[in-house]
């Protein structure tokens, strides 16, 4: 489980990503989030927060964070592992060549979506965007 301080840091960082999130009692609201989310593993909470930032225009409810965390923690099936392995393979190839395997990414998204792994699809979208941003920073096309 994440420590109270780690959970507070992650929720505070998440709050800073949403400048229009201004509750009447900020410390009370953040404290309630920390209390409700303290049982989550740090890595799971960080990944859930990252997915939310990429997918949502609005600060999430505790329920939304818990829902994503639960999906991230559900037992992985062999075909889910295959998606993850393929994504790692694509990322490694990108790091070596500077080129994105768009066909491979589309294949993973299609099959992960059909299998009901919405957050696997969202993660792939995030990874693709990050690779494209890196390419732009390095002057690639």
Image (cartoon, grey):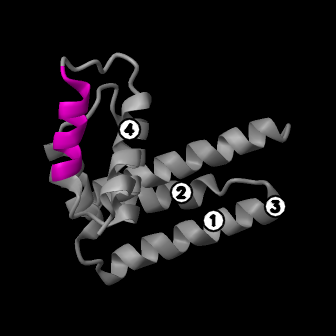
Name, please, the residue furthest toward the bottom.
78
| Residue 141 seen | no
Q: CA distance from mark 3 to mark 4?
A: 37 Å
Measuring from the top left, give residue 19's x and y in whole percent.
40, 19
Question: Do the numbered discs 3 and 4 sit on residues whose CB atoms are within 8 Å?
Answer: no
Q: Which mark is residue 105?
A: 2
Q: CA distance from mark 1 to mark 3?
A: 10 Å
Does residue 140 lie above or below 48 as drawn? above
Q: Residue at x 53, y 57 (%)?
A: 105
The C terminus appears in which quarter of the rendering?
Answer: top right
Question: Do the numbered discs 1 and 2 sit on residues whose CB atoms are within 8 Å?
Answer: yes
Does residue 138 lie above or below 7 as drawn? above
Q: Return the residue at label 4.
A: 12
Q: CA distance from mark 4 to mark 2?
A: 32 Å
User: In the rendered structure, which segment of residues is drawn in magenta?
Assistant: 25-35
Q: Which mark is residue 106?
A: none
Assign a secondary structure to mark 1.
helix
Measuring from the top left, give residue 79's x and y in whole percent.
35, 78
Which one is nearer the viewer's eye here, 46 or 95? 46
Left of 90 or right of it: where is 17?
left
Mark closest to the chain's N terminus, 2 or 3: 3
- Badge nearest the viewer, 3 or 4: 4
Name, please, the residue furthest toward the right.
139
Mark closest to the chain's N terminus, 4 or 2: 4
Which image quadrant for residue 88?
bottom right
- Badge nearest the viewer, 1 or 4: 4
Q: Return the residue at label 1.
A: 90
Assign a secondary structure to mark 2.
helix
For label 2, count other residues whose C-alpha is less than 10 Å away and answer few (under 14), some (14-19) or many (20+).
many
């Amino acid at each position: 489980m994440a420590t109270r301080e780690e959970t507070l840091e992650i929720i505070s960082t998440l709050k800073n990503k949403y400048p229009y999130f201004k509750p009447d009692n900020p410390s009370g609201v953040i404290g309630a989030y920390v209390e409700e989310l303290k049982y989550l593993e740090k890595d799971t909470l960080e990944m859930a927060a990252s997915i939310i930032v990429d997918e949502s225009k609005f600060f999430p409810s505790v329920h939304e964070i818990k829902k994503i965390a639960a999906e991230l923690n559900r037992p992985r099936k062999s075909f889910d592992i295959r998606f993850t392995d393929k994504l790692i393979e694509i990322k490694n190839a990108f790091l070596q060549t500077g080129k994105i395997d768009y066909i491979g990414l589309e294949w993973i998204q299609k099959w992960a979506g059909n299998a009901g792994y919405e957050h696997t699809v969202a993660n792939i979208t995030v990874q693709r965007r990050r690779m494209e941003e890196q390419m732009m920073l390095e002057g690639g096309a």
